[in-house]
Amino acid sequence: MTGRAELSALLGWARAVQRGDVPGSLPLFLEVAERAAEAGESLVAADAWLGYGESLGQIDGRERESLRYFDRAASLAPGTPVAALASLAAGDVLRGCGDAEPAADSYARAVTIFEGIDDVFGECLARRALADLQISLDLVDEAMPQVACASMLALQADEPELAADLQGMLGQRLAASKRFGDAVSPLSVAADLSRMLGNYPMEMRARSALLNAVYFAEPDATAAHHAQLARVMELATAGAGADAGPADRASCEARARFRLAGQLRAASSATPHGWRSQPGSRARPGRCCSPPGMRCLKTAGRRTAWSASRAPPTCWPRPGTKTAVSWPTRVRSRHSPSSSGGTSLT
Protein backbone atom coordinates (compact mmCIF):
# COMPACT_ATOMS: atom_id res chain seq x y z
CA MET A 1 0.00 0.00 0.00
CA THR A 2 1.29 3.50 -0.86
CA GLY A 3 2.41 5.49 2.16
CA ARG A 4 1.65 9.10 2.95
CA ALA A 5 5.22 10.24 2.25
CA GLU A 6 5.14 8.76 -1.24
CA LEU A 7 1.70 10.23 -1.94
CA SER A 8 2.84 13.65 -0.77
CA ALA A 9 5.89 13.45 -3.02
CA LEU A 10 3.70 12.53 -6.00
CA LEU A 11 1.33 15.38 -5.18
CA GLY A 12 4.24 17.81 -5.02
CA TRP A 13 5.46 16.58 -8.39
CA ALA A 14 1.98 17.05 -9.89
CA ARG A 15 1.90 20.65 -8.67
CA ALA A 16 5.36 21.29 -10.09
CA VAL A 17 4.20 19.98 -13.47
CA GLN A 18 1.03 22.08 -13.20
CA ARG A 19 3.07 25.29 -13.16
CA GLY A 20 4.52 24.60 -16.60
CA ASP A 21 2.17 22.09 -18.24
CA VAL A 22 -1.42 22.37 -17.04
CA PRO A 23 -2.91 19.59 -19.23
CA GLY A 24 0.01 17.32 -18.40
CA SER A 25 -0.72 17.62 -14.69
CA LEU A 26 -4.22 16.13 -14.99
CA PRO A 27 -3.22 12.43 -15.13
CA LEU A 28 -0.77 12.98 -12.28
CA PHE A 29 -3.41 14.50 -9.99
CA LEU A 30 -5.84 11.74 -10.97
CA GLU A 31 -3.30 9.05 -10.09
CA VAL A 32 -2.57 10.62 -6.70
CA ALA A 33 -6.29 10.96 -5.91
CA GLU A 34 -7.02 7.32 -6.76
CA ARG A 35 -4.01 5.95 -4.88
CA ALA A 36 -4.77 8.13 -1.86
CA ALA A 37 -8.35 6.85 -1.79
CA GLU A 38 -7.11 3.26 -1.86
CA ALA A 39 -4.73 4.02 1.02
CA GLY A 40 -7.46 5.70 3.07
CA GLU A 41 -5.71 9.11 2.95
CA SER A 42 -8.77 11.28 2.45
CA LEU A 43 -7.00 14.58 3.03
CA VAL A 44 -4.35 13.83 0.41
CA ALA A 45 -7.07 12.70 -1.99
CA ALA A 46 -8.98 15.94 -1.40
CA ASP A 47 -5.86 18.01 -2.11
CA ALA A 48 -5.28 16.03 -5.30
CA TRP A 49 -8.86 16.64 -6.49
CA LEU A 50 -8.38 20.32 -5.68
CA GLY A 51 -5.31 20.38 -7.95
CA TYR A 52 -7.20 18.47 -10.65
CA GLY A 53 -9.99 21.05 -10.55
CA GLU A 54 -7.50 23.94 -10.66
CA SER A 55 -5.92 22.52 -13.79
CA LEU A 56 -9.30 22.05 -15.49
CA GLY A 57 -10.25 25.61 -14.57
CA GLN A 58 -7.31 26.91 -16.59
CA ILE A 59 -8.21 25.01 -19.78
CA ASP A 60 -10.48 26.83 -22.22
CA GLY A 61 -13.93 25.31 -22.38
CA ARG A 62 -13.50 23.12 -19.30
CA GLU A 63 -13.92 25.72 -16.56
CA ARG A 64 -17.34 24.55 -15.42
CA GLU A 65 -16.18 20.96 -15.40
CA SER A 66 -13.75 21.89 -12.64
CA LEU A 67 -16.59 22.70 -10.23
CA ARG A 68 -17.47 19.05 -9.59
CA TYR A 69 -13.90 18.35 -8.50
CA PHE A 70 -13.85 21.33 -6.16
CA ASP A 71 -17.05 19.96 -4.62
CA ARG A 72 -15.44 16.53 -4.33
CA ALA A 73 -12.39 17.99 -2.59
CA ALA A 74 -14.56 19.89 -0.12
CA SER A 75 -16.71 16.84 0.64
CA LEU A 76 -13.66 14.67 1.32
CA ALA A 77 -12.13 17.17 3.75
CA PRO A 78 -14.95 19.26 5.28
CA GLY A 79 -13.93 22.06 7.60
CA THR A 80 -10.28 22.00 6.50
CA PRO A 81 -8.11 24.50 4.62
CA VAL A 82 -8.39 22.28 1.54
CA ALA A 83 -12.17 22.74 1.62
CA ALA A 84 -11.74 26.50 2.05
CA LEU A 85 -9.33 26.74 -0.89
CA ALA A 86 -11.72 24.65 -2.98
CA SER A 87 -14.54 27.10 -2.21
CA LEU A 88 -12.32 30.04 -3.15
CA ALA A 89 -11.31 28.41 -6.43
CA ALA A 90 -14.93 27.55 -7.21
CA GLY A 91 -15.89 31.16 -6.56
CA ASP A 92 -13.25 32.36 -9.01
CA VAL A 93 -14.48 29.99 -11.72
CA LEU A 94 -18.12 30.94 -11.18
CA ARG A 95 -17.27 34.62 -11.27
CA GLY A 96 -15.28 34.16 -14.46
CA CYS A 97 -18.31 32.42 -15.99
CA GLY A 98 -20.55 35.32 -15.02
CA ASP A 99 -22.42 33.53 -12.21
CA ALA A 100 -22.09 36.24 -9.58
CA GLU A 101 -24.53 34.96 -6.96
CA PRO A 102 -23.17 31.38 -6.81
CA ALA A 103 -19.67 32.89 -6.72
CA ALA A 104 -20.64 34.96 -3.69
CA ASP A 105 -21.98 31.82 -2.00
CA SER A 106 -18.65 30.05 -2.59
CA TYR A 107 -16.65 32.97 -1.21
CA ALA A 108 -18.96 33.11 1.81
CA ARG A 109 -18.36 29.40 2.49
CA ALA A 110 -14.63 30.00 2.33
CA VAL A 111 -14.96 32.85 4.84
CA THR A 112 -16.89 30.58 7.21
CA ILE A 113 -14.36 27.74 6.98
CA PHE A 114 -11.31 29.94 7.41
CA GLU A 115 -12.96 31.71 10.33
CA GLY A 116 -13.80 28.37 11.93
CA ILE A 117 -10.17 27.24 11.86
CA ASP A 118 -8.89 30.66 12.99
CA ASP A 119 -6.88 31.20 9.80
CA VAL A 120 -6.46 34.97 9.68
CA PHE A 121 -4.78 35.30 6.30
CA GLY A 122 -7.10 32.84 4.58
CA GLU A 123 -10.15 34.66 5.92
CA CYS A 124 -8.64 37.93 4.72
CA LEU A 125 -8.28 36.56 1.17
CA ALA A 126 -11.82 35.20 1.16
CA ARG A 127 -13.33 38.45 2.40
CA ARG A 128 -11.27 40.39 -0.12
CA ALA A 129 -12.58 38.19 -2.95
CA LEU A 130 -16.17 38.68 -1.82
CA ALA A 131 -15.73 42.44 -1.39
CA ASP A 132 -14.13 42.77 -4.82
CA LEU A 133 -17.05 40.92 -6.39
CA GLN A 134 -19.56 43.14 -4.60
CA ILE A 135 -17.71 46.32 -5.60
CA SER A 136 -17.58 45.18 -9.24
CA LEU A 137 -21.38 44.92 -9.09
CA ASP A 138 -21.69 48.38 -7.48
CA LEU A 139 -22.82 46.87 -4.17
CA VAL A 140 -20.50 49.19 -2.28
CA ASP A 141 -22.53 49.28 0.93
CA GLU A 142 -22.50 45.50 1.12
CA ALA A 143 -18.76 45.44 0.46
CA MET A 144 -17.82 47.98 3.14
CA PRO A 145 -18.04 45.57 6.14
CA GLN A 146 -16.03 42.97 4.23
CA VAL A 147 -13.30 45.47 3.34
CA ALA A 148 -13.09 46.78 6.90
CA CYS A 149 -12.82 43.27 8.35
CA ALA A 150 -10.37 42.09 5.67
CA SER A 151 -8.18 45.13 6.28
CA MET A 152 -7.93 44.46 10.00
CA LEU A 153 -7.20 40.80 9.30
CA ALA A 154 -4.46 41.84 6.86
CA LEU A 155 -2.80 43.87 9.61
CA GLN A 156 -3.00 40.89 11.97
CA ALA A 157 -1.41 38.71 9.27
CA ASP A 158 1.45 41.21 8.84
CA GLU A 159 0.21 42.31 5.42
CA PRO A 160 -0.30 46.09 5.85
CA GLU A 161 0.23 46.65 2.13
CA LEU A 162 -2.79 44.49 1.38
CA ALA A 163 -4.81 46.45 3.95
CA ALA A 164 -3.78 49.71 2.29
CA ASP A 165 -4.73 48.37 -1.12
CA LEU A 166 -8.15 47.24 0.13
CA GLN A 167 -8.91 50.59 1.73
CA GLY A 168 -7.71 52.51 -1.31
CA MET A 169 -9.89 50.40 -3.59
CA LEU A 170 -12.95 51.07 -1.44
CA GLY A 171 -12.23 54.78 -1.05
CA GLN A 172 -11.78 55.34 -4.76
CA ARG A 173 -15.01 53.53 -5.57
CA LEU A 174 -16.90 55.61 -2.99
CA ALA A 175 -15.40 58.80 -4.40
CA ALA A 176 -16.34 57.73 -7.93
CA SER A 177 -19.91 57.35 -6.64
CA LYS A 178 -19.66 60.94 -5.30
CA ARG A 179 -19.88 59.68 -1.71
CA PHE A 180 -16.95 61.85 -0.71
CA GLY A 181 -17.72 61.90 3.00
CA ASP A 182 -17.70 58.09 3.16
CA ALA A 183 -14.50 57.97 1.10
CA VAL A 184 -12.43 60.05 3.54
CA SER A 185 -11.92 57.31 6.17
CA PRO A 186 -10.71 54.48 3.87
CA LEU A 187 -8.52 56.85 1.85
CA SER A 188 -6.98 58.18 5.08
CA VAL A 189 -6.20 54.62 6.19
CA ALA A 190 -4.65 53.83 2.79
CA ALA A 191 -2.52 56.97 2.92
CA ASP A 192 -1.32 56.39 6.50
CA LEU A 193 -0.45 52.73 5.91
CA SER A 194 1.35 53.58 2.66
CA ARG A 195 3.43 56.18 4.46
CA MET A 196 4.20 53.72 7.26
CA LEU A 197 5.46 51.25 4.63
CA GLY A 198 7.41 53.86 2.69
CA ASN A 199 5.39 53.04 -0.45
CA TYR A 200 5.33 56.53 -1.91
CA PRO A 201 3.58 55.82 -5.25
CA MET A 202 0.72 54.20 -3.32
CA GLU A 203 0.66 57.06 -0.81
CA MET A 204 0.65 59.60 -3.62
CA ARG A 205 -2.39 57.98 -5.21
CA ALA A 206 -4.21 57.71 -1.90
CA ARG A 207 -3.48 61.28 -0.81
CA SER A 208 -4.41 62.73 -4.18
CA ALA A 209 -7.77 60.97 -3.99
CA LEU A 210 -8.10 61.98 -0.34
CA LEU A 211 -7.41 65.64 -1.16
CA ASN A 212 -10.21 65.53 -3.73
CA ALA A 213 -12.60 63.78 -1.31
CA VAL A 214 -11.91 66.22 1.53
CA TYR A 215 -12.40 69.18 -0.81
CA PHE A 216 -15.90 68.07 -1.79
CA ALA A 217 -16.91 66.56 1.57
CA GLU A 218 -15.70 69.45 3.73
CA PRO A 219 -15.33 72.55 1.53
CA ASP A 220 -14.82 74.77 4.60
CA ALA A 221 -12.10 72.63 6.18
CA THR A 222 -9.20 74.77 4.99
CA ALA A 223 -6.69 73.32 7.46
CA ALA A 224 -7.44 69.76 6.32
CA HIS A 225 -7.04 70.79 2.68
CA HIS A 226 -3.70 72.45 3.37
CA ALA A 227 -2.39 69.47 5.35
CA GLN A 228 -3.14 67.01 2.53
CA LEU A 229 -1.93 69.38 -0.16
CA ALA A 230 1.33 69.96 1.70
CA ARG A 231 2.00 66.22 1.92
CA VAL A 232 1.14 65.71 -1.76
CA MET A 233 3.56 68.47 -2.72
CA GLU A 234 6.20 67.00 -0.42
CA LEU A 235 5.85 63.64 -2.12
CA ALA A 236 5.88 65.18 -5.58
CA THR A 237 9.08 67.13 -4.95
CA ALA A 238 11.02 64.92 -2.49
CA GLY A 239 9.78 61.43 -3.39
CA ALA A 240 11.56 58.84 -1.29
CA GLY A 241 13.36 61.66 0.51
CA ALA A 242 10.08 62.43 2.28
CA ASP A 243 10.62 59.44 4.55
CA ALA A 244 8.83 59.15 7.87
CA GLY A 245 10.76 58.50 11.04
CA PRO A 246 9.95 55.64 13.44
CA ALA A 247 7.71 57.81 15.61
CA ASP A 248 5.83 59.10 12.60
CA ARG A 249 5.37 55.58 11.23
CA ALA A 250 3.99 54.44 14.58
CA SER A 251 1.61 57.40 14.58
CA CYS A 252 0.47 56.53 11.05
CA GLU A 253 -0.27 52.95 12.07
CA ALA A 254 -2.14 54.08 15.18
CA ARG A 255 -4.33 56.43 13.13
CA ALA A 256 -5.02 53.71 10.60
CA ARG A 257 -6.00 51.17 13.27
CA PHE A 258 -8.23 53.75 14.99
CA ARG A 259 -10.10 54.47 11.76
CA LEU A 260 -10.41 50.75 10.96
CA ALA A 261 -11.86 50.11 14.40
CA GLY A 262 -14.41 52.85 13.68
CA GLN A 263 -15.31 51.22 10.37
CA LEU A 264 -15.82 47.89 12.11
CA ARG A 265 -18.04 49.44 14.77
CA ALA A 266 -20.11 51.11 12.07
CA ALA A 267 -20.38 47.81 10.19
CA SER A 268 -21.49 45.93 13.31
CA SER A 269 -24.13 48.50 14.20
CA ALA A 270 -25.54 48.80 10.68
CA THR A 271 -28.47 46.62 9.73
CA PRO A 272 -27.33 44.23 6.98
CA HIS A 273 -29.21 44.83 3.78
CA GLY A 274 -28.87 43.77 0.21
CA TRP A 275 -27.42 40.70 -1.34
CA ARG A 276 -24.84 38.62 0.55
CA SER A 277 -23.86 41.45 2.85
CA GLN A 278 -22.43 39.54 5.83
CA PRO A 279 -21.29 35.94 5.41
CA GLY A 280 -19.64 33.99 8.14
CA SER A 281 -19.43 36.09 11.27
CA ARG A 282 -22.19 38.60 10.51
CA ALA A 283 -23.07 38.88 14.19
CA ARG A 284 -19.55 39.46 15.43
CA PRO A 285 -17.37 41.41 13.02
CA GLY A 286 -15.52 42.76 16.06
CA ARG A 287 -13.49 39.51 16.24
CA CYS A 288 -11.09 41.14 13.80
CA CYS A 289 -10.03 43.54 16.53
CA SER A 290 -8.98 40.71 18.82
CA PRO A 291 -5.26 40.46 19.62
CA PRO A 292 -3.03 38.68 17.09
CA GLY A 293 -1.87 35.15 17.76
CA MET A 294 -4.35 33.08 15.79
CA ARG A 295 -2.91 30.48 13.41
CA CYS A 296 -2.21 31.99 10.03
CA LEU A 297 -1.38 30.74 6.55
CA LYS A 298 1.60 32.96 5.96
CA THR A 299 5.04 32.46 7.41
CA ALA A 300 5.33 34.76 10.40
CA GLY A 301 7.64 37.74 10.13
CA ARG A 302 8.61 37.22 6.50
CA ARG A 303 7.52 39.42 3.62
CA THR A 304 6.70 37.63 0.40
CA ALA A 305 6.99 38.34 -3.28
CA TRP A 306 3.21 38.64 -3.52
CA SER A 307 2.90 41.20 -0.73
CA ALA A 308 5.85 43.16 -2.08
CA SER A 309 4.28 43.45 -5.52
CA ARG A 310 0.81 44.17 -4.09
CA ALA A 311 -0.69 41.79 -6.67
CA PRO A 312 -3.57 39.59 -5.44
CA PRO A 313 -3.20 35.83 -5.72
CA THR A 314 -5.58 35.83 -8.67
CA CYS A 315 -6.65 38.64 -10.95
CA TRP A 316 -10.24 38.70 -9.61
CA PRO A 317 -11.59 39.18 -13.17
CA ARG A 318 -14.85 40.83 -14.01
CA PRO A 319 -17.81 38.55 -14.80
CA GLY A 320 -17.56 36.99 -18.22
CA THR A 321 -13.78 36.73 -18.27
CA LYS A 322 -11.62 33.66 -17.85
CA THR A 323 -10.35 33.03 -14.35
CA ALA A 324 -7.03 31.61 -13.27
CA VAL A 325 -7.55 29.56 -10.15
CA SER A 326 -4.00 28.65 -9.23
CA TRP A 327 -3.36 29.85 -5.68
CA PRO A 328 0.07 30.83 -4.41
CA THR A 329 2.29 27.97 -3.33
CA ARG A 330 2.85 29.64 0.03
CA VAL A 331 -0.91 29.50 0.72
CA ARG A 332 -1.35 25.85 -0.18
CA SER A 333 1.89 24.56 1.30
CA ARG A 334 0.89 25.56 4.81
CA HIS A 335 -2.09 23.21 4.50
CA SER A 336 -0.41 20.38 2.66
CA PRO A 337 -1.32 16.95 4.06
CA SER A 338 2.38 16.14 3.81
CA SER A 339 3.11 18.57 6.64
CA SER A 340 4.16 17.02 9.88
CA GLY A 341 1.28 16.25 12.15
CA GLY A 342 -1.27 15.85 9.37
CA THR A 343 -3.92 13.22 9.87
CA SER A 344 -6.21 11.28 7.60
CA LEU A 345 -9.90 12.05 7.70
CA THR A 346 -10.88 8.44 7.37
Image (cartoon, rainbow, N blue to C red):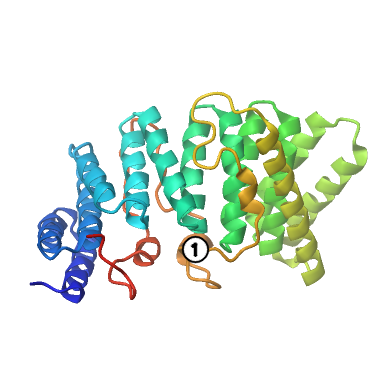
- Name the spot of residue 97 as percent of width and height, x first: 30, 32
Q: Position of residue 174 (x, y in %)?
A: 65, 32
Residue at point 25%, 64% (across, down): 344
Query: Callout 1, which amino acid?
Result: Cys
Seen at 37% across and 35% down, the residue is 103
- Identify the image quadrant of residue 37: bottom left
152 vs 238: above or below:
above
Q: Is residue 98 left or right of residue 289?
A: left
Residue at the limit of the structure toward the left, as seen here: 1
**In the rendered image, which quarter contains the C terminus?**
bottom left
Give the quarter of the image for residue 69: top left
The crowding category of the residue bearing disc 1, from other C-alpha atoms within 10 Å (few below 14, some 14 to 19, many at least 20), is many
Where 71 falls versus 82 (above or below)? above
- Kindly identify which residue carries mark 1: 296
Secondary structure type for disc 1: loop
- Res 107 quadrant in image: top left
